[in-house]
Amino acid sequence: MTQTTPPPLYAAQEPVFPRKVSGTFRRLKWWIMLVTLGIYYLLPWIRWDRGPNLPDQAVLLDMAGRRFYFFWIEIWPHEFYFVAGLLVMAGLGLFLFTSALGRVWCGYTCPQTVWTDLFILVERWVEGDRNARVRLWKAKWDFHKWRLRLTKWAIWLGIAMATGGAWVFYFTDAPTLARDLLRFEAHPIAYGTIAVLTATTFVFGGFLREQVCIYMCPWPRIQAAMMDPDTITVAYRDWRGEPRGKHRKAVQAEDAAPLGDCIDCMACVNVCPMGIDIRDGQQMECITCALCIDACDDVMDKIGKPRGLIDYLALSDEPAERAGAAPKPVWKHILRPRTLFYTALWSLVGVGLIYALFMRSDIELAVSPLRNPTYVTLSDGSIRNIYDVRMRNKHAEARVFQLSVTGDTGVRLQLEGQADRRSILVPADQTFMQRVYVTAPRQDPAAKQVRSDIRIWIEDTATGTRASQATTFNGKAE
């Protein structure tokens, strides 16, 4: 009985040297790279005036102040549901785009794709196009090879350091941190974060590249559940291209089968950053970057054949195209029950977040009853409960808050340390805690009941805005 050797669980990395290509989708990728990298590197430097004593950086994740600032929006720690909602929208958006257009996120806007494109651009600029890079790969390590490799690695390292440096600017004032970094006065965490991100960017974008997409990213294995035959994705029209072969001017034998449009030039393979052959059908490794479309269209133009041998198309259109009929309009592929369902969910979450954002109050309070002891009996027989009231002032200036208490009984409120006043100055954009005494006279029903419902209020004296929270008053049961 013949014993077969099981295939290896991990295939050794085969070097991929994508060839330079021009065309519609390549230009689109350049523009997307320019916009995304521009946003990433420049966003921390945009200023936004929020008033005195508040940061003037437009986008800032202030860990020390426990705030997230995004232009005019300020997110407090207890409002983390906004971040959770944005993450849900991002996931639903990814499902939507994958269902409609395949792995369009991976091919155009994924950070791994963007930085890999940038690193390949540098590699091509230093070492030459595909053939030159292949020769250099096979060449011995002489002075010329070392010079080119060290030059390329140095530029990669500079890009990677800029990537890590830009990331830390989102967590503190960018100009101040930049000055401290240059003077070696920044916190060690800043240097450590830059070092880690520099290393990962350098390795992922320069050396691992397609390995990250194939082995490290889970999305290639999830995408199949998001796609169906109506999904528009990059595909090869084999019914038009096969049988492939070189088109020579010599007269072929009369009994030879006519060749298809594909001349087997390997242009689609040579430009693919994943190193796959799209003519083999749908593959997990394909990121639908569409560079193979540009390469194939260029070849079709040169040999006088119509474009579209490799194109964005839906597999459900194959029977119609094989019969010579026109495929369904693009909008019918995009507007179908699955994509409409994802769009509805995405919109519902977005509308909910917008509603919550614009309906939230500029003042808030949280009331915490002191449980030890649950109540105190005063010398005149009155019953006192103690509460810690945390008041949030989200305004850019200090505000005076008036405190009061309501309920079905005659309880009265008093601030600790202030016998006759019930107002307190809360600093700008801060949470202020005030201890409050609520007292029920001896004959009041609240003093005689085990528990009574009350509500503590705060009012902004400048605008009249009010906020409240319900709590309980503990009495001495008789």
Image (cartoon, helix red, strand yellow):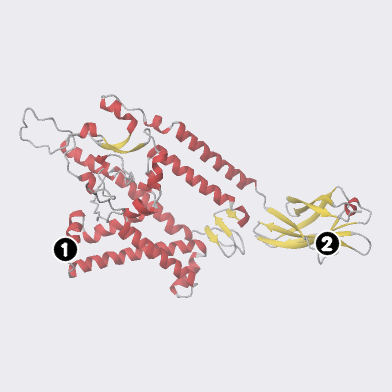
Residue 366: where, in percent of width, then height? 71, 55
Quarter of the image for residue 134 reads bottom left
Earlier in the chain: of badge 2 and badge 1, it is 1
Residue at screen point 17% across, 41% down: 264
Task: State the separation of the CA atoms marked 2 and 1.
Answer: 85 Å
Residue at the location (22% across, 48% down)? 270
Q: Can residue 464 be seen from the camera position used here?
A: no
Q: Which mark is residue 139?
A: 1
Q: Amino acid at mark 1?
A: Ala
Q: Is residue 225 visible?
A: yes
Q: Is residue 313 left or right of residue 66?
A: left
Residue 243 x/y as whole percent: 17, 34
* Of residues 411 and 363, the one drawn nearer to the viewer in this rendering: 411
Q: Which mark is residue 421?
A: 2
Question: What is the x, y in percent for residue 161?
Answer: 38, 65
Select label 2 or label 1 by which is in front: 1
Foreground residue among 241 and 13 = 13
Label 2: element kind? loop
Q: Quadrant of residue 237?
A: top left
In screen coordinates, is 65 left or right of 310? right
Q: Tell me the amino acid under the disc marked 2.
A: Arg
Q: Position of residue 272 (x, y in %)?
A: 26, 48
Number of marks in picture: 2
